[in-house]
Amino acid sequence: MDGGADSATVRGQGSETTAPSAEAERPPLTGRIYYLLGGTLPSTYNAWISRDLTGPGWRRRQAARPFSLMLPFAVVFALLPGQVAVRAATVAFLLVAGAGLGFATSGFFRNRRLEQHGFPPVFSANDDDEDDE
């Protein structure tokens, strides 16, 4: 198949939207938080979104999302009363599970987010199904 899972470009896009550029408009902090939580950003941020989902380090950024969403729960469990060892083990489990699930599902969620913002997926869902057989 042309382009691996870590391909820096999305099939079907011109180089003007995937090439790293200094003029790619970055969303404000509230927009990035909304994007982190799964929201769709306006098309003015398409160059930034494309670079986020297809540029170098995309898998690490995708894996960091579930980890960062798990952080508030880990803090709550750390502050609950109980034995320190139990609280520490619970926090460690939540954070490791969040990071692990993030890496395991990064390709699927990257394609979902690409389609959500109007870009073609890097690999089709049928490619994943054929591997399972």
Image (cartoon, helix red, strand yellow):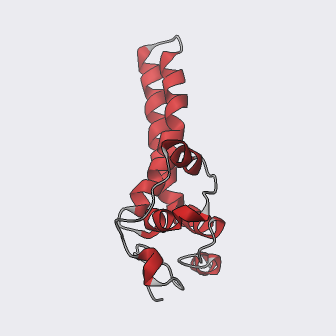
Residue 97 visible in the picture: no
Place of residue 87 in the rendered image (x, y in percent of width and height, measured from the top left): 47, 21
Residue 52 visible in the picture: yes
Which quadrant of the structure image shows residue 114?
bottom right
Residue at the spot 55% in from the left edge and 78% down from the top edge: 123
123 or 37, which lies in front? 37
15 or 70, which lies in front? 15
Residue at the spot 45% in from the left edge and 55% down from the top edge: 26
> In the orientation shown, which residue stands out farthest toward the bottom?
1
Place of residue 99 in the rendered image (x, y in percent of width and height, measured from the top left): 45, 47
- Judged left or right of residue 55, residue 116 is right
Which quadrant of the structure image shows residue 96?
top left
79 or 15, which lies in front? 15
Residue at the spot 54% in from the left edge and 22% down from the top edge: 76
Residue at the spot 46% in from the left edge and 29% down from the top edge: 91
Looking at the image, residue 8 lies above or below residue 79: below
Place of residue 47 in the rendered image (x, y in percent of width and height, measured from the top left): 48, 68
- Judged left or right of residue 95, residue 127 is right
110 or 49, which lies in front? 49
> In the orientation shown, which residue stands out farthest toward the front?
23
Looking at the image, residue 85 lies above or below residue 50: above
Looking at the image, residue 58 lies above or below residue 120: above
Task: Count numbered badges in the picture.
Answer: 0
